[in-house]
Amino acid sequence: MSDEGGRRSDAGATLQGFVVYVLWGFTALYWPLIKQAGALELLAHRVVWSFVLVAVLLLVLRRPWAWVKSIRYTWPRLLTAAVLIALNWLTYIWAVNAGHVAEASLGYFLNPLVNVVLGMLIFHERPARQSLIGIAFAAIGVAVIAFVMAKTVWVALVLAVTFGVYGVAKKRAVLGALEGLTVESGVLLPIALGYLLFLGPAGHFGTGLGPTLLLIGAGIVTAVPLWIFAVVAPRIPLSTLGMLQFVSPTLQLLTGLFVLGQHVPPLYFAGLALVWVGLGVYLAGSLRNARRAALVAGEHV
């Protein structure tokens, strides 16, 4: 493929990746549509219908099933990942429906910096000084937000930490996005089905066409963007991917403030500005390192 063709391919993948992050950003509008079901029931349906959908996708796409054999070697990590992503989903659904979208968006703004900290603590990585400066700015920002929103800042911290440790658990469990979601939802499936059976008539599935479709849609909202992203992500430059990941929390924040009507103290924005400064410092360093690595690789070609 020519360089021009490769650039067009990357541009198309970047656009598709951007669309996926936009979809993820607007999920904050989905859960309030069926908030009467409660966070636990919504989580249970999200697990069940995600499993159904990804299993169907794997069959339709005729993916090889050899990866199933590798599960027996990585099941502790996959089990840990399943528990963490369930806690992450549950916290996010509850936060959105309880009017804490700003705190939820902060959690995903913090996630890249939490990843740096986990890399230091678990994998003994040595981040550049610029990364540490970025973390320091973000930490001060979180401290400011914690001061003015002490009762709900835990939402952001739980989301950031669970998703960060989830990434650690999956780091050495090499599975594709769809295969990984199949395993994670499969692990949680018995618990989710058991909870729905326990609810029985008190549940909202089957109480009307609208609620039933919305509950089934929880799986679509989860699996379809992930599937599209799994297809396009390998074609997106890593530096671009780093920029795109901030689209979702930005849209979540805007949705919470201007659509769902959440009110936050003025100091929240001061703290968030410090978090953004930290992200900017971190991202600038990452982009510079990526360019330097590309130059070094070019010199050795």
Image (cartoon, rainbow, N blue to C red):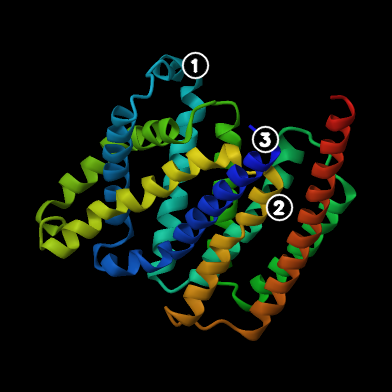
Q: Which residue is mark 1?
A: 73
Mark 3 crowd level (few <14, some 14–19, many ≥20, 10 Å Cα): few
Of 204 and 211, nearer the camera is 211
Of 14 and 162, nearer the camera is 14
Residue 127 appears left or right of 57: right
Residue type marked 2: Leu
Dots 1 and 2: beta carbons under 8 Å?
A: no
Q: Residue 214: which quarter of the image?
A: bottom left
- Kindly report the distance in space between the C-alpha atoms of the residues bearing marks 3 and 1: 41 Å
Of 301 and 60, nearer the camera is 301
Q: Position of residue 198 (x, y in %)?
A: 17, 47
Marked residue nearer the N-terminal end (2 or 3): 3
Q: Position of residue 52 (x, y in %)?
A: 26, 38
Look at the image and tell me in which quarter the C terminus lies.
Answer: top right
- Kindly report the distance in space between the C-alpha atoms of the residues bearing marks 2 and 3: 37 Å
Q: Residue at x 82, y 37 (%)?
A: 294
Q: Position of residue 293 (x, y in %)?
A: 83, 37
Marked residue nearer the N-terminal end (1 or 2): 1
Residue type marked 3: Ser
Q: Residue at x 79, y 48 (%)?
A: 286
Residue 97 appears left or right of 211: right
Q: Which residue is mark 2?
A: 113
Q: Which residue is mark 3?
A: 2
Residue type marked 1: Tyr
Mark 2 crowd level (few <14, some 14–19, many ≥20, 10 Å Cα): many
Residue 263 appears left or right of 267: left
